[in-house]
Image: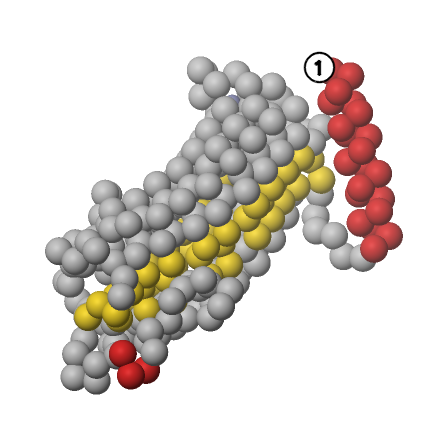
Amino acid sequence: YKQLKIQIPKQDQIDDNQDCHLVNKCLVLKHQLYPNYSQKEHQNFKHLFAERLLQVDEGMFTNVPIETIFCPSLVRVCGREYRGGFEGTTIENVNLPNLTTVEHYGFWRCSVKQLFAPKLQHIGYFAFANCSLVTVELQQLKVVENYGFSRCWKLKRANLPSVVQMCAGAFCDCERLETLRVPKLQSVGNTVFNYCKRLRIVETQLSQNEFSCCSWCKCCVVCKQQLHKAQLFGSITNVKELKDKQIKIRHLMLALDKVH
Ligand SMILES: [Zn+2]
Ligand SMILES: [Zn+2]
């Protein structure tokens, strides 16, 4: 609770007969679901305390200036174009241990810096686009739909060991992205690394010719045809292999430096 820096309302402050009520600047939701309920009319809260909430519906908190959330049961964040569940909020720390799905635009244009979602499996269009993430580590994530992490301009490293599908533009315009680990990737859309100028290491089992970019980029690993140089095969299983691969990476970096 303390880690989240959320002011948890005291039990005696929570009115047993009331729901959707404010305690200081904290909105308290008591039930599991709130179908078709928009919080836009109550803009004057900064924290969300929803211990049992399972689903954030589309548009539910769009553009509400929420700073912290406590939703340990949350499974799904719904959304569609410009109606992402948490779209445009000011949440910096997303700590959702039971989250499995973020639909389209779910956290689009948020201030998210830290993302802890160990069960997250599927993210939709623009789900985390334009966020402030620096590193992304999602052990269970399988599908990144179109532009899922695009324009995360602070993002440096992404470790996605279970991802099998990345759709078009998944990481485009991540200008600071250096390392991407997708050892199980099976299918990839167009322009996934469009304008990823600093991307050097991509761990994947796919080959260069399975990636494609657009004619106006010209600066990513695909356009420069450097993917084969910055490529590792399979996944790391033991320490010796890891060391071998680290040596390989160093050699790759040196080789790339010579090219530049
Ligand atoms: Zn979808
Ligand atoms: Zn390119």
Left or right of 53 on screen, residue 38:
left
Which is nearer the eye, 149 or 226? 149
Report x, y in % for residue 136. 55, 48
Report x, y in % for residue 29. 25, 72
Above or below: residue 47 compared with residue 136: below
Left or right of 171 on screen, residue 130:
left
Above or below: residue 232 compared with residue 251: below
Above or below: residue 28 compared with residue 245: below
Asked whether residue 208 appears in the rendered view, the answer is no
Q: Residue at x 80, y 33 (%)?
A: 250
Report x, y in % for residue 117. 49, 60
Q: Residue at x 50, y 24 (%)?
A: 195
Q: Which residue is mark 1?
A: 260
Report x, y in % for residue 57. 24, 60
Which is nearer the eye, 69 or 212? 69
Q: Residue at x 52, y 16 (%)?
A: 218
Amino acid on which the number 1 mark rests in the picture: His
Q: How is the image coloured?
A: secondary structure
Q: Quadrant of residue 55?
A: bottom left
